[in-house]
Image (cartoon, grey):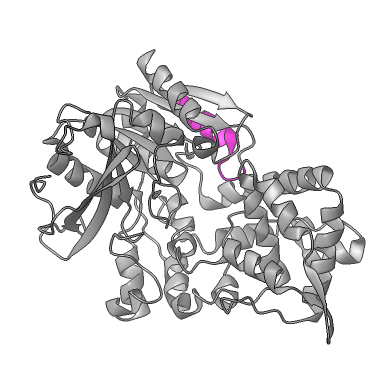
Amino acid sequence: MSKVMGSDPREATTVRQPGLVLTDHHFDVPLDHTAPDGERITLYAREVVATGSTDGAGRARADLPWLLYLQGGPGFGADRPVGRSGWLDRALEEYRVLLLDQRGTGRSSPADRRTLPLRGTPEEQAGYLAHFRADSIVRDCELIRHRLTGGRPWTVLGQSFGGFCTVSYLSHAPEGLAAALITGGLPSLDEDADAVYRAAYPRMERKTLAHYDRYPADADTVRRVVAHLAEHEVVLPDGSRLTAEAFQQLGILLGSGDGSHRLHYLLEDPFVRTVDGERLGDAFTEQVAGVLSRAGSPLYTLLHESIYAQDGRATGWSAHRVRAEFPRFDAAAALAEGRPVLLTGETVHPWMLDTHAALRPLRRTAELLAERTGWGPLYDAGRLARNTVPVAAAIYHDDLFVDTAHSLRTARAIRGLRTWVTDEFEHDGVRAGGRRVLDRLLHLVRDA
């Protein structure tokens, strides 16, 4: 495949999988888009086409329109496909798909405990990461679009935080979009982080109690583990400390379609007999570490609350402050009062900078980001009210991660947006529902 005009000079590598042709792309973009002649970072994206969309020499047909996929997060690289399946299988019937590692993730100038110290002091690291929000991601996408399509608009599919980025795209560069598809990612346009978490904790309680209704024995198991953690120091295989509060974060599993079942299997047999008495087994702690680790996605903690910040105020560990308004989440009190221990979801807390091994070297950087003021607007309500881009959004009823009421209010604020509200799927519906979810959204934008 010939080199893309304006892309990084490294050769684009093309490989094949059953049913797919995959091509790597690298792009140099400004760190700060308001200073285009300043420092630059490298972005990585993977182009995917179906084998039936290429000629005998493997060259992709030029007439295929582009679909850009924006991953959830923040802080996660794009999906790594293995053959044709799910939503990708449906997309490849008519699109050339681009899987973008958003800045700081995957192979796009990754930001973690190893690389961030290269930036210098924690103050310099925090200043660097302040350029990693949705507004910068949208500007990255626009530079990439011009280099790949020659300026033609493309369709964007945004999952979760990728949907937040898509609403920013509609606000700041709608001319780049032929259509916008959003799954589980319609953000509030004006609520701050405190309001987001005040809506989130009751959902977390409902999800926890629903899990205990499905698997009643798990309520007792969770209480036993919490009681054990109150008496013993437990260090996970990755060096993180497992406290009661950290253990409660396993509730993040309840946000996916099969998450309640996965959580149940994880809790089936956490204890083993040892020469020192009953202890948490290695198989259990290894599974817990796999769920809770932030080694590969530190931005999920460092930048999480900043995705709600656009009023100039510091987020100030919002989820942690708001949790105090919901005393039923106090695990020790639940044990003392004979209540079920409630689990939490995607909330971030300052104590994570001590318990999570991968976050300890970034403690001061995280604190500075939590203290940072002057966050600019991510959305333009006026422009969204005048929107002319075909938009469809899947809204999952009682989504653990994104408040349904907030999403519906935003849906009404974006001109022409068509919704599909369903309780058939959880937050990961685009994966669980696969081609059926994407097909429904494509039908909605084309029937507008």
Residue 338 place in picture, x, y as percent: 92, 60
The secondary structure making up most of the magenta span is: helix
Identify the residue at the far bottom of this view.
Answer: 275
**Front-lying residue, 371 or 261:** 261
Q: In this view, does 243 lie to the left or right of 410?
A: right
The answer to whether residue 195 is magenta is no
Q: Give the range drawn in magenta.
A: 400-413
Evaluate whether residue 287 shows in this view: yes
Q: In this view, does 186 lie to the left or right of 234?
A: left
Image point 43% across, 54% down: which residue? Answer: 74
Q: In this view, does 362 lie to the left or right of 28?
A: right
Evaluate whether residue 379 shows in this view: no
Residue 41 in the image: above or below residue 258: below
Image point 81% across, 43% down: which residue? Answer: 214
Residue 305 place in picture, x, y as percent: 49, 57
Image point 83% across, 43% down: which residue? Answer: 213
Q: In which quarter of the image is the N terminus?
A: top left
Q: Is residue 375 left or right of residue 318?
A: left
Residue 446 in the image: above or below residue 89: above
Image point 49% across, 74% down: which residue? Answer: 358
Identify the residue at the far top of this view.
Answer: 447
